[in-house]
Image (cartoon, grey):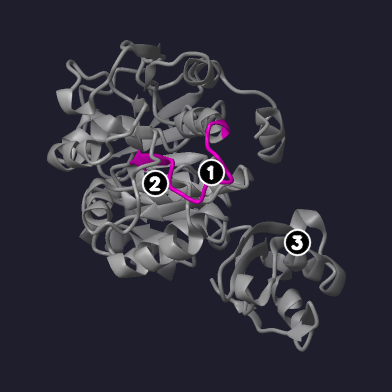
Amino acid sequence: MDITTTLAKLHIEELNAMQEETLSAILHTDRDVVVLAPTGSGKTLAYLLPIATRLDAKLDEIQAVVIVPSRELALQSCEVFRSMGTGLRPIALYGGRATMDEHREVMRLKPQIVFATPGRLNDHIAKQNFSVGDVHWLVLDEFDKCLRMGFRAEMQTAVESLPNVERRVLLSATDAEEMPRFVRMGKTERVDFLDSEEQIPDRISLFTVKSPEKDKLQTLLKMLMEFGSEQSIVFLNYRDGVERVAKFLSAEGFVISTLHGGLDQRQREEAVYRFANHSTNVLVGTDLAARGLDIPDVANIIHYNLPVGEDEYVHRIGRTGRWDATGRSFIILGPEEHLPEYVKEQTAEHPLQPAKGAAPQPCMATLYIGKGKKDKVSKGDILGFLCKTCGLEGAQIGKIDVYERYAYVAVSRSVAKRVMKMAENAKIKGVRTKVELAF
């Protein structure tokens, strides 16, 4: 795998300093590597690029295991790897679905790299659902969160179940006082880009918004009307609050995604998918959305409820300003609320603007196409169909994802109805297929 070619596929002109140093540490030393860098700085790509060059595409065995604290991060990381176009096969393994279904997928796909939550990884290893004999790379991503979430024992079991690991990479947004022995780190190369004095990058602008009422719904409404079609995440502390705010905004005409622990796995994946491909422009969620969502163009973070602590505050804000992009963070303060002590950076007061017009709509809509990989339909086939048969231009087509029996494609919301009309009775690769609005 050529890294320069991969970056071109990802439309990335150059790596940042942390990514360059991580790549060098992994490729040009034989040591284990610890990467300490703020959330949003691009750590996922930093370790995936060099490790991908060390995996054997001809070997149909798992060669690298990445342990993550959440199913969302497993899915996101797997998608990043897939988008690199290396020819290697990744898979995400996590709770919330049947282990047997995952085992069947492992048998069919024959993955070479696995992204897994600790408990689910141990479940597969204990059942001998795949061989670990060729696993020579172990990555512990968001190691700090894994420990805080109580995964220490499960992580220790996983590490001890991988006897042939030769290189370890540990990534964290905070610096642990002491490295647990079970990690078995050898001689270590340290990549440290943490700034203890500055938790929030200066490319993110910080604001407070004063709500004249304890109930902040009208204040939030005015803010989102002002932000237009920009991608915004609204954070609350509890799922009941998420549902209340989402119901209110939906009634006002907004297209909303919701994310909290009370949703089943399919609902959570769909919520993230819709937001990531711009079929919704507002995501309302608990702090579940503060980790593992690597969506590059989130413009605004809105703290509807004050974060319960500094870590939650930092990780919420880390959803915007990804890599070197700019972003904005807004804390809504009720009449009796004040900025928490952990907000050390300077903030400016953002004046509310009157709400005018209708709720701004997302720029994209997602279409369902009733053919997939089993029908030998590829992304290129769908792209050609949309351009030639439906008359779309490249700028009107967004994310295309092809699954076994169907596909999703994001198109400009303004042309979605026209596409469905033109696609009626049309053929993809000589076969008529259903094209309808998914969400």
Question: The residue tagged with tag 2: helix, strand or loop?
Answer: strand
Q: Is 28 in front, or is 323?
A: 28
Question: The residue tagged with tag 1: helix, strand or loop?
Answer: helix
Residue 7: x %, y % from top left: 67, 33
Asked if disc 2 and disc 1 are in contact, CB closer than 8 Å, the reply is yes
Point out which mark residue 81 bears. Answer: 1
Instruction: Classify residue 6 as left or right of residue 193.
Output: right
In the rendered view, would you say 147 is above or below 111?
A: above
Residue assigned mark 2: 115
- Residue 218 can be seen, yes or no: no
Amino acid type indicated by mark 3 = Gly
Identity of the residue drawn at 33% across and 64% down: 265
Q: Which residues are magenta?
A: 53-67
Q: Could you tell which of marks 3 and 2 lies nearer the N-terminus?
A: 2
Residue 152: x %, y % from top left: 15, 36
Q: Could you tell which of marks 1 and 3 lies nearer the N-terminus?
A: 1
Amino acid type indicated by mark 2 = Phe
Q: Quadrant of the N terminus?
A: top right
Q: Is 66 in front, or is 240?
A: 66
Residue 415: x %, y % from top left: 74, 69
Residue 118: x %, y % from top left: 25, 46
Question: The residue tagged with tag 3: helix, strand or loop?
Answer: helix
- Residue 2 can be seen, yes or no: yes
Q: Is 436 a magenta residue?
A: no
- The quadrant in which residue 423 appears is bottom right
Q: Residues within 10 Å of mark 3 (few under 14, many from 20)?
A: few
In the image, which is nearer the foreground, mark 3 or mark 2?
2
